[in-house]
Structure formats: structure tokens, C-alpha cells
């Protein structure tokens, strides 16, 4: 099941370096930041509403932006309402501040789904009694979890006013978007080589002509210092270079 179309996935790819920068510098998982970006502005760079692409409500004053940057050694933050990079980094810092205020462990790239869900619930104001009941976090219509949005939002015509809403949420929540992004965009794990080849493995041996051929014998004597490597599901044995021989001594 998927929610995001090709244009949205392309937008995530566009902003992915910013999400990864925030993950590296501040510790918040990139997929959580991307899911917040989706919920707040559909991966937008600008928005008509006050608060920018990450919909800070109320807007973050310059002093807070500078404080967030100083906390993580970032000195070039500008305006989170017009600069997506600043918005991403400020959202990450904002999340870590919310988590710390609750006395919870800081978010890390390895944080559990539950920790990410609780942080997203804090980002949205901790309404509905729990993150499990929050459509912002847990809505998933394709899996039979259609929830209703109840509350107030800034009026598009006059941001100083708020309007009340009570309607079904047709969009996926943060958790569903995180799962989809990780499934569609996370790089595949590199293959793990066995500790040593066994009789079932394919072993390719470099001959005198430099060409690799599969080993068919059960025992092979290699008359040179060799390097053993694993790639493409096969073991490869080649002569060591002069430098490699020196390093091994």
C-alpha cells in the first residue's frame, strides 16, 4: 500500500540531503522529519500559512532560531518560514526540546517507531489523549484506520484568527508516511559475507592470465600471496599487490 505519488517522492529526494543533515547534526531520524514535512506542507518550500513549511505555530522568533543553531553548532540558520533547510533543522531541534522536556531519551537515528510517534505527537500538541488516537500521528485509511481531525487551525484569510474543524482525515499520519519512505527510499543493506567460504560457495580464482575462473577442486594450492574478497555472491581470490604484501608483514 502506498500513499505518496511520484511527484511527492521526487520532492523527498530533493530535500533528502537536508533531512540527513539534520539527522547527523541533531539526531532526529530523517524519515520522521520528512513525514512531518508532508503533514505540514506536503513537502512544500513555501506556504500561505504562518509558520513556513513546518508550520511553526506560533512562528519561531529569530532569537529562538539562533538558540537552536547555537545548541548544535549551526551558525547559518536564517528564516524557517522561507528557507527549507532552516525549517528542517529547527523542526529537529524543536523535537529534541520537546522530548527532553518530557524526560525522555533524546531521539537518535535508531529510535523506535514508538519514540518517533510520541515525538510527532508532541510536535502536534499532544491532543486526542495519546499518539495512538492522534490522526496526525496514527491515521492510516488504507489499513482501516480512518480518524477525524478535531480542533482549530489558523484562518487562511486572517492568520490572527482560528477556525474550528471537525472532519475525517484523508491523509496518512506520520507513522504511515515514515514506513512508506523507509521502504521506498532507504538504501538496501549491503550483503554480509560469510566468515569463510564453504563447499556450497562459488569461488573464483585468478589464473596466470589474470582471468577469473571458478574453482572446481575441493583443495587448491595457491602459489602466491593472495587476497580473498567477497562480492556479488561469490568469493574472489587474486594475487596481492606489492603494497599489500608489505602491509601484511
Image (cartoon, grey):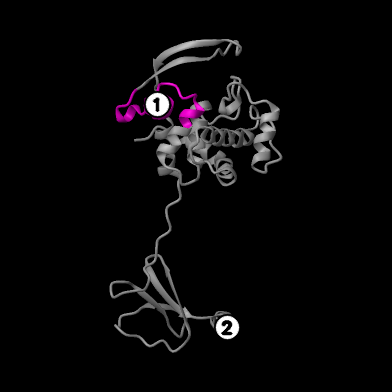
- The residue carrying mark 1 is 130
> Which mark is in front, 2 or 1?
1
| Residue 181 image label | none
The local crowd at label 2, few if under 14, some if 14 to 19, many if 20 or more residues have their Cα within 10 Å, is few
Q: Which residues are magenta?
A: 120-146
Q: Is residue 74 visible?
A: yes
Looking at the rendering, in which quadrant would you find the N terminus? top left
The percent position of residue 224, horizontal first and vertical second, equals 47, 87
Does 244 appear above or below 21? below
Is label 1 in a helix, a strand or a loop? loop
What residue is rendered at 34% in x and 23% in y? Answer: 146
Q: Mark 2 and mark 1: span between their CA atoms?
A: 62 Å
Q: Nearer the viewer, residue 190 or 204?
A: 190
Q: Is residue 62 magenta?
A: no
Q: Could you tell me residue 51's position as x and y percent?
A: 60, 23
The image quadrant of residue 190 is bottom left
The residue carrying pointer 1 sits among few (fewer than 14), some (14 to 19) or many (20 or more) residues within 10 Å by Cα, namely some
Q: Which residue is mark 2?
A: 246
Residue name at image x 38 percent, y 88 percent: 221
Q: Quadrant of the C terminus?
A: bottom right
Q: Quadrant of residue 16?
A: top right
Left or right placement of residue 131 versus residue 14 in this view: left
Work out which residue is located at the far front of the displayed protein and give it.
Answer: 103
Q: What residue is drawn where x is 40% and y is 65%?
A: 232
At mark 2, the secondary structure is helix
Q: Position of residue 235 (x, y in %)?
A: 39, 72
**Is 127 one of the magenta-colored residues?**
yes
Mark 1 or mark 2, which is nearer the start of the sequence? 1
> Looking at the image, which residue is at 55% across and 41% down?
19
Work out whether residue 7 can be spotted: no
Where residue 89 appears, as percent x and y from the top left, is: 60, 37
Amino acid at each position: 500500500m502506498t500513499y505518496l505519488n511520484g511527484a511527492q517522492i521526487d520532492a523527498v529526494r530533493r530535500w533528502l540531503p537536508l533531512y540527513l543533515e539534520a539527522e547527523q547534526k541533531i539526531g532526529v531520524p530523517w524519515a520522521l522529519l520528512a513525514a512531518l514535512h508532508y503533514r505540514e506542507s506536503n513537502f512544500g518550500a513555501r506556504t500561505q500559512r504562518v509558520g513556513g513549511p513546518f508550520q511553526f505555530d506560533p512562528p519561531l522568533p529569530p532569537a529562538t532560531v539562533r538558540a537552536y543553531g547555537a545548541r548544535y553548532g549551526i551558525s547559518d540558520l536564517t528564516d524557517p518560514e522561507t528557507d527549507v533547510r532552516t525549517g528542517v533543522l529547527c523542526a529537529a531541534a524543536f523535537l529534541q526540546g520537546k522530548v527532553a522536556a518530557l524526560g525522555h531519551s533524546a531521539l537518535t537515528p535508531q529510535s523506535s517507531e514508538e519514540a518517533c510517534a510520541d515525538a510527532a505527537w508532541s510536535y502536534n500538541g499532544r491532543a486526542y489523549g495519546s499518539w495512538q488516537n492522534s490522526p496526525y500521528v496514527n491515521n492510516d485509511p488504507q489499513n482501516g484506520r480512518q480518524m477525524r481531525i478535531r480542533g482549530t487551525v489558523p484562518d487562511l484569510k486572517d492568520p490572527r484568527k482560528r477556525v474550528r474543524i471537525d472532519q475525517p482525515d484523508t491523509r496518512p499520519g506520520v507513522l504511515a508516511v515514515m514506513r512508506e519512505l523507509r521502504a521506498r527510499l532507504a538504501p538496501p543493506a549491503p550483503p554480509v559475507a560469510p566468515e569463510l567460504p564453504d563447499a556450497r560457495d562459488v569461488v573464483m580464482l585468478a589464473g596466470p592470465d589474470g582471468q577469473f575462473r571458478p574453482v572446481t577442486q575441493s583443495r587448491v594450492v595457491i602459489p602466491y600471496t593472495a587476497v580473498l574478497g567477497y562480492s556479488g555472491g561469490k568469493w574472489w581470490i587474486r594475487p596481492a599487490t606489492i603494497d599489500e604484501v608489505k602491509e601484511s608483514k
